[in-house]
Image (cartoon, helix red, strand yellow):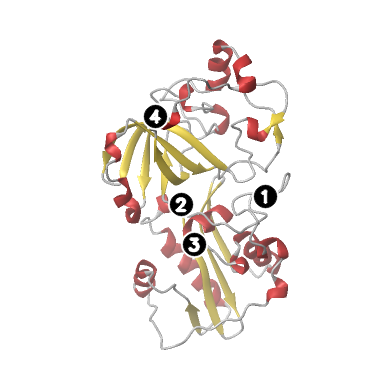
Amino acid sequence: MVHLWNAVFGYGTAHNAPALVIDRKLDAADGLFVVAVLGDQVLGTVMAGYDGHRGWIYALAVRPERRREGLGSRLLAAAERVLASRGCVKINLQVVEGNDGARLFYEARGYVAESRLSMGKLVAENVPAAVREPGAVASGGAPGEPRGAERAFQCRAIGVIRSPHTRAEETPIQPSFAKGVPGRVEMLPEYEAGLRDIEGFSHIYLVYAFDRAGPCSLETTPCLGDRPRGVFATRAPSRPNGLGLSLVRLVRREGAVLHVEDVDILDGTPLLDIKPFIGRFDSREDAVCGWQDDVDDETATREGRRGFRGSRRRGGTGG
């Protein structure tokens, strides 16, 4: 849920830090938090409040790749039913100025703009210091803590990565072990203009969120190793900020969709950025690769592919 809210809302204020809001709503145990789940994936949420007279709708969010399926409407209707069952006579909500898509969504479902001035006052002493301080890390946490325990920087997903991989333990750990595996990068429409001229590059870096990784661990035993290493000397996903980086082959572009190959990323992974591979900048003939230089090619290929046997078999993210 934390990642979903960061991707959809991009909150930049401490008191709206998703981890803080979710924890406090769960503590309230008021039955006004509706979550849509498929397997182990959170597809959408809506949160409501009721003071005995008016009801409020908050945090209606749907994963970008699952929009236009009616899920948002069903979540909203579920929250409205709960509020109505408690005697609520009027439901209010707020839409950020300029968010015409959200405004039109609610207008189509009977909500109307009112001549009111929205005002608020922050009760600073109830906002934990961990989320008030600017140095806190948005997408990560301290070692051993669940991802999302600290917040400050907020990242908004710009699209979603599609692949045949659905299980982490059966996915190649790097693109070099996923040769020819097809995938798609589906950009949100508002970012399509940023793809101009990308067709001229054969390879691109995808920057994404390890949204299904475990807690941060500063020491980990990597797939190609037999003893613990510092996480910054590996490509393991259990990182403080949960960021992944993969170099994939760009096959073609179709509007806001990039068709790619050599994909080692879980299906449905949120995309944060794209950068082109540029040989004159990125290639290093004198590179030394630390403990990786001691791993022979046969072992690297066998362990690096993990349970993956080809593009027809479904797998999950490497890292």
What is the spatial separation of the Cα atoms under label 3 and label 4, in whole angstroms? 37 Å
Q: Which residue type does callout 3 highlight?
A: Phe
The residue at which mark 2 appears reads as 157
Q: Is residue 177 above or below residue 88?
A: above
Alpha carbon separation for disc pair 3 and 2: 10 Å
Residue 218 placement (x, y as % from top left):
71, 38
**Percent position (x, y) of residue 169?**
58, 29
Quadrant location of residue 182? top left
> What whole-number distance in Å separates the C-alpha atoms at marks 1 and 3?
20 Å
First of labels 1, 4 by sequence position: 1
Residue 224 seen? no
Mark 3 / mark 4, whichever is N-terminal? 3
Contact, CB < 8 Å: mark 1 with mark 3?
no
Residue type of the residue flagged with mark 2: Ala
Label disc, if present, on residue 141 of the rendered structure:
1
The residue shown at (39%, 29%) is 280
> Does residue 64 lie above or below 27 as drawn?
above
* Label 3 element class: helix
Q: Nearer the viewer, mark 1 or mark 4?
A: 4
Position in image of residue 52 (x %, y %) = 61, 84
Depth check, front residue: 100 or 288: 288
For the residues labelled 1 and 4, the Cα–Cα distance comes to 35 Å
Q: Earlier in the sequence, mark 1 or mark 2?
A: 1
Q: Badge 3 is on which residue? A: 9
Q: Disc 4 marks which residue?
A: 280
